Amino acid sequence: MMPSQISLVGLGVMGKSLAFNLVDHGFNVAGFDIDPHHRQAAHEAALPLNMASGKGQLTVVDSLSQLLACLQTPRVIALSVPAGEVIDTVIRELLAAGLAPDDIVIDTGNSLWTDSERRARDYQGQLRFFNTAISGGEVGARTGPSLMASGDASAWAQVKPMWLAIAAKVDHAGQPVGQFEQGEPCAAYLGGAGVGHYVKMVHNGIEYADMQLIAEAYHFMSQALGLSAVEIGHCFARWNQGPLNSYLMAISAEILQTPDPITGKPFVEVVLDKAGQKGTGMWTAVNALQTGVAAPTIAQAVFARAQSGLKAVRVAAAKTRTNPASVAYDDIDTQLENLHDALYCAKLSVYAQGFDLINTTAQQQGWTLDFAQIAKIWRAGCIIRAQCLSEIASAYQQTPDVANLLLVAPFAEAVNRQAPGWRATVASAAQAAVPIPAMTASLSYFDALYSEVLPANLLQAQRDYFGAHGYARVDDDESRQYHLTWSEQPKRQQIR
């Protein structure tokens, strides 16, 4: 038996899919899972692949010691296990089984980026710790994910050929291509230990917001415009042929046109309106607060999921509503045109917030990042893949130091041109009592970005009044701080 070039610890949905993807591209893989049922399922599913010519082999073993014995040196062990303490447990077991300092351990889960940085410090000298954040879910892992790699730089040289082979690919126009077609891989080495997982965290924050925006558009079309799920699905499918083209728009169109196999009703209407979350969106919102970056759409997307969980409270409150809104729209086509523009502008606003957050954290952490490269590896394989990412990559290539994406000429022109439809949609939703918190937050973000004067002057005056926090003056250097002794000020002037 030929030694394996890489191993997978964890043969659940993601681990097994990654293993098969590697085998498809000619790599020999050793696999282990603590669950014997997972081992057996992976072994049986691998039989046809192992018999195919021109492909690699998947060897499923019964212990970590056997796993290490199967690997060529220096050994590469990818972990596909839940984030958190489980990762440290597996690493300690690998060390006990004979892991060497030159061996590479790759965390492919959704770990918190600060945990990745801590592990790089903790295991230094015992192994080469590496991370690869993966986006694309089961299908992406099997046929081509987006890979955000970071960690020990020397490890990348050994891992790179495998990751570039299995990653999603795009053609010269930035369009996704098939698993075995030639193209530019959506995989890149981004930097030190925590960078890959940080970028993936923000990716997931953008994902939360994009999903919420599409859901809000659906809700407005259903509740305010009275369109059926199938009609909305057809509309989304049309929109997916233009600037709103994205994976999430495509699957939303399909979902809305799918009947429930039990009742025959639209499938979406039998799904309970309570959305779950695993925490990465929350991490992004918290990180934005910690770093002082405005990311209101991402935060509102997290809050919307939390509020969706209050089903019993919402049902009870709805029964007590005394003044429900009732708005009739004569021109549905105009409302849909406005909504299209609102969705596009809000989507760009979300990307602007996400990249601003990455940029600010990079400056704080001393990371050197290529934002065009990040946009490029999101063009295929990942959940937020969208047509606009090619335009975002181009914008960063031309103006890499731009303060905010919404200030780049093509986006600034598009958003300013389509803002009237955005405002009209937000106003119409408010009149119809249809909540669109993410779309509204995006509009406020845009308006604040383009406002020369904000009411923070009153806020700072309030802080100086009750807390003596000081203030800067518009007629002096900003670095110079003043304080007004409020108790000594004359009585307030009366308005006559």
Image (cartoon, rainbow, N blue to C red):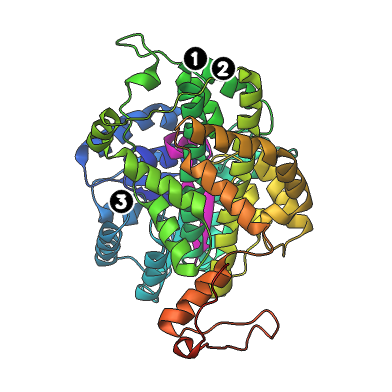
Q: Nearer the viewer, mark 3 or mark 1?
A: 1
Alpha carbons under labels 1 and 2: distance apart = 6 Å
Alpha carbons under labels 3 and 2: distance apart = 38 Å
Q: Are marks 1 and 2 in contact (CB under 8 Å)?
A: yes
Q: Which residues are magenta?
A: 133-151
Q: Which residue is mark 2?
A: 234
Q: Nearer the viewer, residue 86 or 11?
A: 86
Q: Are marks 3 and 1 in contact (CB under 8 Å)?
A: no
Residue farthest along the top direction in this orientation: 264
Q: Which residue is mark 1?
A: 230
Q: Nearer the viewer, mark 3 or mark 2?
A: 2
Q: Amino acid at mark 2?
A: His
Alpha carbons under labels 3 and 1: distance apart = 37 Å
Q: With respect to residue 62, does 196 lie above or below?
A: below
Q: Amino acid at mark 1?
A: Val
Q: What x and y, as percent, mark residue 406?
A: 68, 53
Q: Residue at x 56, y 36 (%)?
A: 427
Residue neighbourhood size for the residue with mark 2, other residues' Cα within 10 Å, grouped as few (<14), some (14–19), many (≥20)? some
Q: Residue at x 49, y 24 (%)?
A: 224
Q: With respect to residue 166, does 111 lie above or below?
A: below
Q: Residue at x 69, y 49 (%)?
A: 392
Residue neighbourhood size for the residue with mark 3, other residues' Cα within 10 Å, grouped as few (<14), some (14–19), many (≥20)? some
Q: Look at the image and tell me whether residue 492 can be seen.
A: yes
Q: Nearer the viewer, residue 67 or 341?
A: 341
Q: Which residue is mark 3?
A: 82
